[in-house]
Every structure is written in C-alpha cells, then in structure tokens.
Image (tube, rainbow, N blue to C red):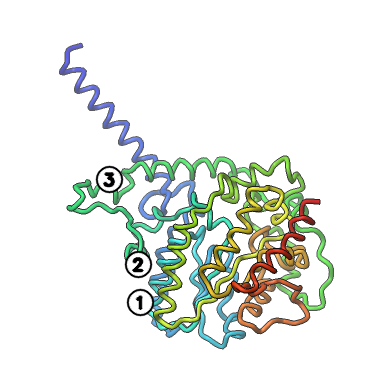
Amino acid sequence: MNAKTFLIRLITLIFLGCLSIYIFVMFVDPYQIKGLNLVNKHAGGHSDRIMKPLILEEMGDDFKMFIIGSSRTEIFVPSMVEQISRQKTYNYSLVNASLEDYIAAVNHILHVQNPKIIYLQLDFYTFNETHSTRNTILNTPLEKYLGQYIDLKRATKSNNELVFFNTTYFSLAAFIDAYKSVKLYLINRNKEVSPINVSAQAPTVTPHKDETSLSRDMKNKNVEVPDYYFISDCKKNCTDRYREQYKYYNYHINEPLVTKLLGFIKKMTDENQVKLIIALSPMNKEHLEMVLSDQKLTKNWFRVKEILSHIFPSYNDFNNCSVNAFRGQLYWIDSVHMTRKMSKIMMSVALNQPLINEIPENFGFKVTPKRLNNYLLNLNNCVINAGK
C-alpha cells in the first residue's frame, strides 16, 4: 500500500467515524432540539427551556408571582397558589433544573414582567458540583439571560475557535450526554411501576379528615413514574445505586461557586424590589433516611442549610424530619415529588398562611442567621433517629 492510498483510506475512516458519531447523537438528541429523539423523550428537559419562556412572553399577561424550581415544583398549580397569594401566578418549573437555570429564569422574568414575588425552591441535589444544565440551556431562549452572568464559552472571533464545534451536535459534550441518555434508557426501558414498587415507597394511607377526591384517586391507581424514583426496603445494600440515581454520587459542594450563583439571584431581586422566597424542597421519610445514612451526604445536608443562611436573610426549610408526619400517596407521588395536597400545605407555610391543623413542628421552618445554630442543634436529633 502506497502513501497516497493509505492517506485516502485514513481520511475516509476518520470521516465515516465522525459521521457515525454525529448520526448517533442526532438519533438520541440529548438536548431535544433537532434530532430524531428516539430514546430521550423525557430525560433532557430541553423543551421546558424553550416553551416556558415563549409561553410567558406570548401570553402577555401581567403575572405578579412566579414559581421556579425543578420538576418537583410542577405540582404547584397556579390557581391554587393564587387562592393563597392573591397574586396572578405563573409556574416556571424546569425539569432537572440547576442553579444556572434559576439565574436565567429569574433574569428572564425581570426582563419581561414586573413581578412582586418569586418563590424559588431548591433541591438537595442542586448543590452538587457535578450537576449542571449549561449544555441544555444552549440554543434556547434562556441562553442569552444566562450568558449575562456566566461565560458559556461560546466561540467568538476573538478566541479563534470554530463556531461549528461549539454550537452544534458535532461536539464531545453532546456525544457524552447522548451516551448517558442511552445508558439511562437501557437501564429503565423494561421497568414499570408495579404494586411492589408502590407499596415499598408508599404504605397504606391512614384515613385523613381532609382527604380529597384527587388523593383518593392517587391511591387507587399506579402512578406513571420511573421506578428508580422509589426508595425500596433494601436500604444500605443499595445506597450506592441511589446515590447515582439521585445525583448524589461523588457529592461535592463548590461553595464559592454556589455563593456566587445564588448571589446573582439575590442581587437581581433586590435591585428590582422583588420579594424572594427561598425554600428547600422536602423528601419523604425513606428518602431522607437514605441520605442521612451516609456520613458524607449528612455533612453536606447540614452544609447546604448553613450556606443558604449566609446568602439570604431567611429561607423555609421543608427538608427535615418533620416530613415523617406526611406518609403515603396522600402526600407523595414518589419519594421526592409531592402531591397537590402537599404543595398546598407548603405554599401556605411559605406565604405565612399556614393550615394550622396540618402543620407539624419545623415543617418549612423559617431559618435566619440568628436562628441557625439552635435549628442545626435540633436537627442532630433527626440524624440520630434516622440512623437507628
């Protein structure tokens, strides 16, 4: 084989390899924007980041309250919130949201609306340094609102990078995310939520005087959510699997970065005189016990509460042992997603209009810098009891 033939074959091989990778990424469509999307119909959450901003702008209504958070806040129905807040409400929940999403969402809202109240619900997994949705935000309306605060490393003429490799699916990041999507799909494609899954997570519900027709229906049907959301009875021998599924694996908090990102949100709302309500989302008893069974996660669980107290004048903490009072499918769809009844209770607490007969002590506890130390001391009992 002469040099010319070898070179032609090598170039052909490289071209076919690159083409195969590109076709693979297009079939998976990890960011749900331009491919066939055969195995990633619910994982990317990219459509949320396109539709929520566009719907808000097209509606043209004068909304005064906004609900921002991950998929766990989707259950906050605007009409329910409006009954408590007396403010026209828009739900801006984003699937698998990160701190970057929240910066972009708040910035977008302040540019197109004149809000009075923003309710921002943060999840424990959100603080893990490995969790980022920066690639998902690219090529959506939220990109320009995030780009004002974070360098998205988009190519420009000044840095002499090729725009093509940073703005299309022809990138290493896109290939890696496509691979992860396929891996998740293969793990869960044959799994269904069976009665075994449901009973393991949600024991028989004790009759409740305020039970609604919605909650009764929830108990009498199988809820269509992936079973990896459920915490089963295997506990410690499957803790490693749950760490990965709930984004707890290699959990590490980049405190300077978290402080910086949340500081952007505080600065924006302060400058625009918007009331910002910060809340830590709840997880059910079994899920919380799983988290507190791990020393490293427990340390970070406490640290998240300290960090928030250093940034904001106050926040509502729904992520403590008070969730033990809320058991079964009357309050939980799965171990981290609550029902409408639970969301109504939470919103009433956050807006200082609690349903007195239903609120256990410390549920949605209002943490301030002055109250922090005593609160953390009380939480030690929660950790001790969870370990028994």
Q: CA distance from mark 1 to mark 2?
A: 9 Å
Q: Is residue 193 left or right of residue 125?
A: right
Horizontal and vertical percent position of residue 208 = 82, 74
Which is nearer the N-term, disc 2 or disc 3?
Answer: 2
Q: CA distance from mark 2 to mark 3?
A: 22 Å
Tell me the residue at 35%/67% (across/down): 145
Tell me the residue at 35%/64% (across/down): 149
Q: Nearer the viewer, mark 1 or mark 3?
A: 1
Q: Are marks 2 and 3 in contact (CB under 8 Å)?
A: no
Residue indicated by mark 3: 165
Q: Amino acid at mark 2?
A: Tyr
Q: Nearer the viewer, mark 2 or mark 3?
A: 2
Residue indicated by mark 1: 111
Q: Amino acid at mark 3?
A: Phe
Horizontal and vertical percent position of residue 35 = 37, 49
Q: Please state which of residues 172 and 282 is positioned toward the viewer in this rendering.
A: 282
Tell me the residue at 67%/48% (across/down): 295
The numbered mark at residue 145 is: 2
The numbered mark at residue 188 is: none
Q: Tell me: residue 46, above or below residue 111.
A: above
Q: Amino acid at mark 1?
A: His
Q: Are marks 1 and 2 in contact (CB under 8 Å)?
A: yes
Q: Is residue 358 left or right of residue 35?
A: right
Horizontal and vertical percent position of residue 259 = 47, 62
